Image (cartoon, rainbow, N blue to C red):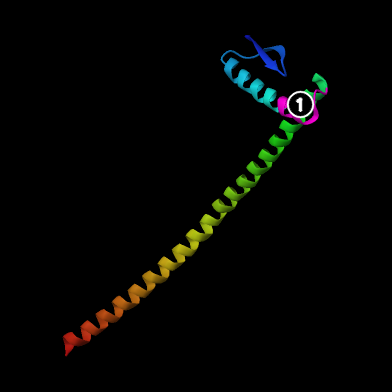
Amino acid sequence: MPLVNVLVNNHAYTVACDDGEEEHLRELAKYVDRRVRQLVETVGQAGDARLLLMAALVIADELSETLGKLDERAREVTALKDARPAEAKKDQASEEELVDALEKATQKIEDIAAKLARA
């Protein structure tokens, strides 16, 4: 299990991760560091534990909002999928009406042709 050194708010941390996840872990740490630095600009140095907690809460809020949007999109997709069969039924009904109309028109034309042939 590889160990990765990351820097958050000018403090070094060594974190273990799975093989192949080192770069991803570094990117996550950079994101956390950016959020902590933004908090430092807003509230000042409030202690590492408090800053990390505040950053975690900000990130959790972002995640919660994103998950909410994802759920909303999933509901929209489900609604669209549910609407498709209804639309398909409408289309099928319209096609059946057209077929009926064409059959009636064909029958009328055949009747007229038969009358003309007898005349």
Q: Is residue 41 magenta?
A: yes
In magenta, the rendered stretch is 36-46
Q: Position of residue 101 (x, y in %)?
A: 37, 75
For mark 1, does the 10 Å Cα neighbourhood hold few (<14), some (14 to 19), or many (20 or more) residues?
A: some
Residue closer to the observer: 110 or 51: 51
Residue closer to the observer: 65 or 10: 10
Q: Residue at x 58, y 13 (%)?
A: 19
Vertical position of residue 37 compared to residue 18: above or below: below
Image quarter hosting the C terminus:
bottom left
Q: Quadrant of residue 42?
A: top right
Q: Is residue 56 visible?
A: no
Q: Is residue 112 left or right of residue 65?
A: left
Q: Quadrant of residue 66?
A: top right
Q: Is residue 113 left or right of residue 65?
A: left
Q: Position of residue 55 (x, y in %)?
A: 75, 28
Q: Which residue is mark 1?
A: 40
Q: Residue at x 55, y 56 (%)?
A: 83
Q: Position of residue 7 (x, y in %)?
A: 68, 15
Q: Is residue 24 left or right of residue 97?
A: right
Secondary structure, mark 1, is: helix
Q: Position of residue 56 (x, y in %)?
A: 75, 28
Please, what is the dominant secondary structure of the magenta stretch?
A: helix
Question: Mark 1: which amino acid?
Answer: Val
Give the residue at the far bottom of this rendering: 119
Vertical position of residue 17 compared to residue 66: above or below: above
Q: Is residue 98 magenta?
A: no
Residue closer to the observer: 68 or 41: 41
